[in-house]
Image (tube, helix red, strand yellow):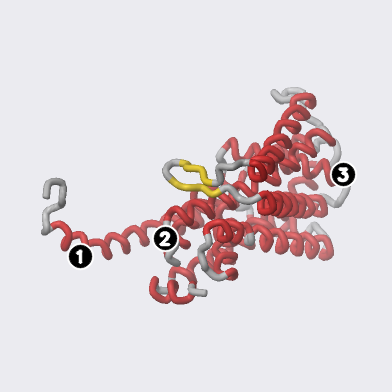
Amino acid sequence: MPGEPPSSIVPAIRTWWPRIRRLVTFAFFATVAVLLLMHLRTVDWHGVFSAMRSHSIATMLFACLLAVASHALYSCFDLLGRHLTGHHLKTRLVMAINFICYAFNLNLGALVGGVAFRYRLYSRFGLGVDAVTQVLATSMLTNWLGYLLLAGAAFAATPLPVPEDWPVGTAGLRAAGGFLSTLALSYLALCALSRRRVWTVRGHAIRLPSARLALLQLLMSSANWLMIAGILHFLLGAQTPFMLVLGVLLAAAFAGVVTHVPAGLGVLEAVFLALLAGRLPDTAILAALLAYRAIYYLAPLILAAIMYLAFESVSGDKMAARSAG
């Protein structure tokens, strides 16, 4: 019939497809390895170890516990997507994939960690593109939903000491805070009141969660951002108000997204130095941020890389069998 491929093409495709898949897999793995090595080479390891030695054991231990709790909580974000899609991958498997994606996202950027790793790993366990897209969208939205609410509260309640040469002043931040909080509350209202429960984004169906699930998204995300701010608060010696540290962190997170710098390298430090100038010595701020990167970024990245290698070492058939249940 017109439009059908010649019969000789189908066997050729079937013959070459396994080789193409192996080539794509090797290319993905090689790209990840190169990006990982490049990232680790940019780390000032001497400064990291010096910064960690400058803090007391109790401070480092408490910061580590908060980091573990934060990563564990974030690893549950994809479980919300599982609830919406109805897929049946095991809880511990979903959390493991979520943890790997988050660790690589923090260090190599959202495109590699948040997107590529999710599609790569979930597809190996049999999830279709639409299901992975729903999980990805739900996880990303959960993360930024809490950000919107907390940034709105922090910018409005505790105005940041913005330098005079910044384009946005205190009044502008307060206005931005009100706008961000409105966005978060509008999402809750949409989930509670909208009659349309499925939205199409670039050809993919995205299901709107219930009001209860949306509220859970808000609570989980807010708790995660608060724990991250708690890590920095204690590493800074608890010498600055917690709400101020939270506001600076949220401002730095926004700046990191806008600049598209992997792991926010340089951006985080610049924002903290600018907004905490005069409150703490620059050396203390930098030491706290280096210790924070070691605890929250680098240590999870090493563990995530090991877990990812373990996943890649298992054949597709075995992975599909393990995912059942």
Quick one: SS at disc 2? helix
Which mark, residue 241? 3
**Residue drawn where x is 84% and y is 46% of the image:** 242
Distance (Cα) linking label 1 and label 2 = 23 Å
Q: What residue is pinned by disc 1? A: 15
Q: Position of residue 250 (x, y in %)?
A: 72, 41
* First in residue order: circle 1 vs circle 3: 1
Along the line of sight, which residue is nearer the eye, 33 or 119?
119
User: Is residue 127 shown left or right of residue 184?
Assistant: left
Name the amino acid type tagged 1: Thr
* First in residue order: circle 1 vs circle 2: 1
Mark 2 is surrounded, within 10 Å at the Cα level, by few (under 14), some (14 to 19) or many (20 or more) other residues, namely: some
Distance (Cα) linking label 3 and label 2 = 43 Å
Q: What residue is pinned by disc 2? A: 29
Mark 1 is surrounded, within 10 Å at the Cα level, by few (under 14), some (14 to 19) or many (20 or more) other residues, namely: few
Say above or below: 176 vs 321.
Answer: above
**Residue drawn where x is 59% and y is 36% of the image:** 258
Say above or below: 253 vs 34.
Answer: above
